[in-house]
Amino acid sequence: MGGILTIARAESIACFPCSPKHAEERLVQIVRDVSRAFLSGQSTAWEELIRVFPQMYLVCGSKLADNDVGRKMADSDPWCALYALLSNPERYEADFENVTLEDGAATYEMLRWSHLTRRKLYMPIRRVYRALVNDPYWAYRWLRHSEDPSLANAIRRTVESEARSDPAAAYLLLAICPEKAEESHWRVACARANTLYYASHLPQFRDASSLLPEQLQVSAKWACHLLLRTRLPTRLQQACHEALVKQPEWVAEYVARRNQISLDELESLTIDCRSVCRPSQLLNRYSEFLRRFKDAKAEKIPA
């Protein structure tokens, strides 16, 4: 159980300032503790806790997946859908495979589980691959793992037909066929947060940085990644900052992964987190982590 409990998204362990091994151990323990609280009927902000710790579905099973709150989360959140599916594939494959496709990493994990268990997915693999290509990083990872020619064909078709209009297809062209890249491909690839992040790793990105969009719709997850990796214009930094502070768990992830962070920036993020209307139990947990991180690191950060 411990192994499968730790394939979760990064924010599940962001609040644990310790080594990965110990973080995984603490993650398993907190999932079990939170699940016991749910099963005992305790009342709290369950939607937030389920979203951050979707592994609860593996512990609680149908008592969570068929519960009104648990069902609502699995119907809308790809990672909740994945873990609900894994808790009972026969019962939930028709309900939750489709929701899982909304996130590339969750889709990758679903395919990996299918491969390891030799269990055929409920949905046609062509449909799964078409959705996976929308997140080119995870499409590439699965292609390297599976060497499936049908996925290679899906990637090729996407590049050939959509590179001038679809951000994922444009990024794939930039990565696979840089000699065919045009300015328009860079503009399209940089128009979406996740493909902008991936494109920023390409050697040619420095020459294309002037093609970044005026505005960018970004989630807290991609705001965290962009702020950690990419030198953004002030207008996009502000958009990422505003998105980041709406989810304290991603603030914790951002702080934990920064080698150095100024006390002013840390204080700003903490204050902004507290100003967002969030369930108090989760917010207090991450605010307390930020306070402890600030106290531990203060003497190591230059004035």
Image (cartoon, rainbow, N blue to C red):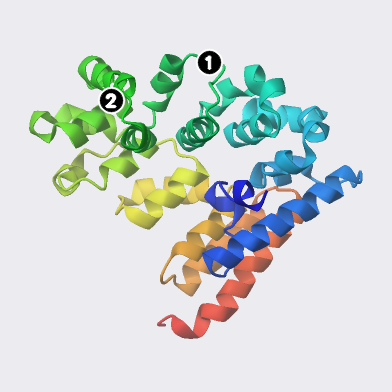
Q: Callout 2: 10 Å neighbours few (<14), some, many (20+)?
A: many
SS at circle 2: helix
Query: Where's residue 103, x and y in %?
Result: 50, 32
Residue at horizontal 49%, vertical 40%?
Answer: 219
Would residue 32 appear left or right of 146 to someone viewing this image?
A: right
Would residue 11 appear left or right of 91 to someone viewing this image?
A: left
Rendered image: mark on residue 152: none
Query: Where's residue 115, x and y in %?
Result: 48, 31
- The numbered mark, 1 or 2, whose residue comes first in the sequence reads 1
In the rendered image of this protein, does residue 206 appear above or below residue 57? below
In the rendered image of this protein, does residue 130 appear above or below residue 292? above
Q: As shown in the figure, which amino acid type bears the numbered disc 2?
A: Ala
Q: As shown in the figure, which amino acid type bears the numbered disc 1?
A: Met
Residue at horizontal 52%, vertical 67%?
Answer: 266
| Quadrant the C terminus occupies | bottom left
Query: Where's residue 67, x and y in %?
Result: 82, 30
Would residue 176 appear left or right of 13 to someone viewing this image?
A: left
In the rendered image of this protein, does residue 283 appear above or below residue 137? below
Task: Report the residue marked by disc 2.
Answer: 169
Cα distance between the residues tagged 1 and 2: 23 Å
Residue 140's image quarter?
A: top left
SS at circle 1: loop
Task: Report the residue marked by disc 1.
Answer: 123
